[in-house]
Image (tube, helix red, strand yellow):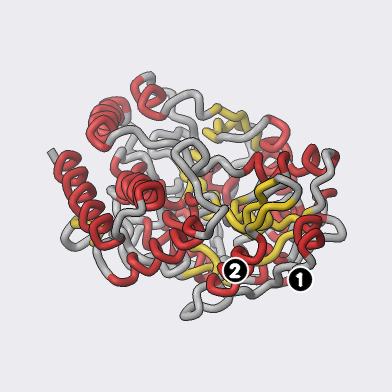
Amino acid sequence: MVSTKKSCIAGAAVLLTASLALQGCSQGNSASNPKGNPAAGEAQKINTEPVNLTVWASMSEEVFQKLVVQPVKMKYPHISLTMVGTDKKIPDLIASDNVPDIITDSIASIPKYEELKLAEDLTPFVKAFNLDLGRISPVVLDTVRKASSDGKLSGLPISGNVVMMYYNKDTFDRFGVPYPKDGMTWDETYELAKKMTKTDGGVQYRGFHFQDVFQFTANQLSLPIVDSKTNKAAVNNDKWRKLFENYARFFTIPGNEVDDKTYGGHQNQFLKDKTIAMYVTSSIFSKLPDALKDGLNFDMVTLPSFSEAPGITTQVDGGIRIVSSTSKHKDQAFLALSAMLSDEAQVWTARNGNTAVLNDPKILEEFGKDIEILKDRNRLGFVRNKPAPPSPSITKYDASAYSIVRSQFKKMVLTHADVNTILRETEELINKAIAEAQK
């Protein structure tokens, strides 16, 4: 879900080049507002002439048809959608004047597209077409607004991320330990991990491992990584120290250690080797059927939470849809996005394993109903926790900063370095990267 980042300097150069190219290719395309001037409270008339919109997205054609095309067709039959794969890079699409009408990415990516002057402000379209934003979960909408600059609405949220703790029931049965439960804290999970880390029959069983992406980039404590007022790192403090120490302690359990080769590579150990008792990750639905056939006896519980934030999962960083500022069909692109927010479309989204973003518990409870492997399992564990509020500061430097944080956490785990030293280094590296980007 989250791709590997290049160096900050290279990233800044790409952004600058793309931004300049965009400014050149978008001259003369000043239609940034919906056409017409409907009376107050009256929705703008919809043009029903057939139109084909392009959508930049990273998903299979089957998923695209199911989760993007079909919801739009249900409401607006005149709108057709064609996917442009993410193998086509945005800077190249800008340079060739072929930017898709709609861009699919994460909420955290909004500052990047604003930097490229590629994210259309959707506020005028919301008013023109009477879209009721009150139907969207306040936390989700607030996260999008925080990521957008200057009071803009630079995209519409369509789905949320799902981070869970999966566990191997057979391993717990083997050691006679009760299964994990919804609502556990990280401290409780740590104690359980110690019990489940042992050697049996010559096999080393590990109590806990996790995929670190969401645990940092959408952390449960809503910690900012860069101060938007000063554009300086905001990581060398007690709260980030607690975050680092919380996750690092799992790798100090005898038998649960990692090295440079095994760090971050535990998905196969959970799915195939079946030697990890508990594994925290985002959706792995596509890989579970084969694991199930291979004998994995699993279930899921809510993501463990911090004692000071009980029942809170990660921040929302799910699917966002951005209308390109270069699109010649902005009205229709906006209508396509609004169709994805209808009750019917959101039920469809939830049933197929993506968290709905509407403020309706009944729709949330539809989660996973159409996913065969979730039947007779704790599918509602995906939606029982509440998402963490957005970080108070979201900047265009966050992506590079989070890459540094994850690299530094790995260094701390592998070298057993002092957390205070690691956080000081992290702050220095982030500030250096920001300074280079600003050049």
Regarding mark 2 in the picture, which secondary structure is present there? helix
Residue 341 visible, this angle: no
| Circle 2 residues within 10 Å: few <14, some 14–19, many ≥20 | many
Is residue 282 positioned above or below 383 on the image? above
The quadrant in which the C terminus is found is top left
Disc ID at residue 178 = 1
Q: Earlier in the sequence, mark 2 or mark 1?
A: 1
Kind of residue at disc 1: Pro
Residue in the foreground of this view, choosing between 190 and 145: 190
Q: Gap between marks 2 and 1, in whole Å?
A: 12 Å
Disc ID at residue 189 = 2
Quarter of the rendering containing residue 9: top left
Residue 147 visible, this angle: yes
Q: Residue at x 22, y 52 (%)?
A: 425
Kind of residue at disc 2: Thr
Is residue 26 positioned above or below 251 on the image? above
Is residue 241 positioned above or below 261 on the image? below
